[in-house]
Image: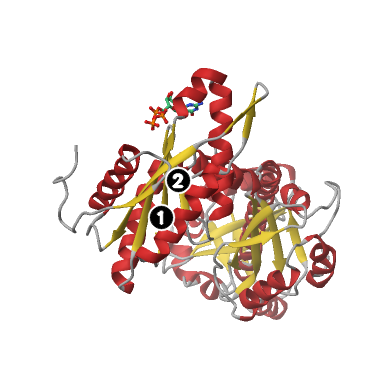
Amino acid sequence: MDRPGLSLLRKVAEGVHGVEALLDAGGRLLWISPSIERVTGRSPAQCLAAADAIELLVVDTDRNHCRRLLAQVLQDGATRDVELRFTRADGAVVWVASHWRRVDGENGEPAVLQLSAEDIQTRKETEYKLLETVAELRRAQALREHYLVRSIDERQRLAVLLNLIRLGILFIDNDRRVLYANRAMLEIWGYSPDTNLIGTREAVLKQTVLPLLAEPDVFLAHLEQVLENRLPVSEPFEIRFRDGRTVTDRSAVVVGGQRAHGIGRVWIYEDITESRRVSEQLVALAERDPLTNLYNRRRFHEELERMLVDAVRRNAGVGLVALDLDGFKPINDAFGHQAGDAVLVGLAEGVRRIIRRNEMFFRLGGDEFALLVPDTDTRGLSELAARLREGVAGLQFSFGGRAVSVTASIGMAIFPDHADDAEGLMAAADEAMYRSKSEGRNRWTFSTRQPGEFSRHSG
Ligand SMILES: Nc1nc2c(ncn2[C@@H]2O[C@H](COP(=O)(O)OP(=O)(O)OP(=O)(O)O)[C@@H](O)[C@H]2O)c(=O)[nH]1
């Protein structure tokens, strides 16, 4: 090639955009294009002055690979393309796409290596970002799947649990549609166990359940009160069913995870029929005499105290009537215990018929009875006593073909005329009753005590 052609070629080589370099077999730099300065911040002169250009320009982890490539390309003449990293003068790393090619010398000159390198840093950064984004997406996806599996498991566990418990659970969403109902809810409200209520409107539910209720209007008013007032938690409400069941309901607004306002309302139903029956039975056992079903001595004391407090507040009188059967033991002895029982039951029924609704009759034990009479005075109590005496004496029994009757000795005292407390009143009525006994039985007697005169006449 002639000289002008050579200088033109040099100009072209020096003006190339990418980096072009020539290296000998020892890795020494023979020539490098000025573009190296744009890519690495090092001038061609600095590069040429370096004893080992690979060490100067290539990051340490890629250097050995470069040296091997150099040897291989020079040896077999096959071109190679590889992405590697250059180090910049400021310490930063620049990715380049490099092309390695052997250039054979003319006239016996040794072959040299032509290295062409394109700056691909921007592309690499984009690639990295993309990879990071993909990795992030994969992690998020894995996490979502993990939580999905966990939430399905959780839901299964919850569904089994909710179907096992005896409380009815109903979840109504903000569109007033059923979102969830457990088995106990279906049972309480008379649905078959396989009914699917999900999506059913509240209004439709109402239509099916109202006919089951003893007081549908009361229930509707309760629903309205809870829903209109948007009560966060409603108080327990008793729902009475026509078949005799009693169910309580309570409800609460459910606040969603992300929404500040509620996402619906959960209703809890509890059938308390059985527990109510048992507790009523227990109360009855505790305060009633099993033979006559009259209130017992325990309830007598409670009522006496209560009536006295009430009487003081209202400035009224309370009458206490003590009633003891005459000659009861001989009935037991002659006709047996069962006959005695029949007399006690007959007496209870007979007295119940005589007394008014606000008067309370108690069996204190054995053949001993008591009556509490609110708002009374001497005259009222005398009239009652007369009716009682007659009523008892008029009771007719028949045991073993023999007609049997009983009489009662009655003693009376009035609060506050004869006593100013419960104990005093009982002592006064007892004393009067014993006077009836000692004066011939089958009669009624008033106490002669004065308030505060507790034990003067006792004994
Ligand atoms: N059949 C029966 N007898 C009872 C019951 N509780 C107590 N008694 C009996 O009632 C009798 C009460 O004795 P008393 O008060 O002396 O009998 P009474 O013959 O009426 O004597 P007076 O009151 O003096 O007339 C006793 O024989 C007890 O065994 C009961 O639940 N059933």
x and y percent of residue 427 in the render? Answer: 25, 46
In this rendering, the answer to whether 147 lies above or below 133 is: above
Name the disc covering residue 362, or none: 2
Q: Name the residue at 26% across, 63% down.
A: 416
Name the disc covering residue 225, or none: none
Q: Is residue 68 visible?
A: yes
In this rendering, the answer to whether 344 lies above or below 350 is: above
Contact, CB < 8 Å: mark 2 with mark 1?
Answer: yes
- Crowding at dot 2, Cα within 10 Å, few <14 / some 14-19 / many 20+, comes out as many
In 3D space, how far apart are the residues under numbered discs 2 and 1 (Cα atoms)? Answer: 8 Å
Q: Is residue 273 left or right of residue 56?
A: right
Query: If you read the primary sequence from the N terminus, does the residue marked by circle 2 or circle 1 appear first?
Result: 2
Depth check, front residue: 277 or 353: 353
State which quarter of the image contains the C terminus.
Answer: top left
Q: Name the residue at 61% across, 60% down.
A: 132
Residue, disc 1: 372
- Crowding at dot 1, Cα within 10 Å, few <14 / some 14-19 / many 20+, comes out as many
The picture quadrant for ligand 1 comes to top left
Q: What residue type is disc 1 on?
A: Leu
x and y percent of residue 232 in the render? Answer: 55, 71
Residue 189 quadrant: bottom right
Depth check, front residue: 161 or 275: 275
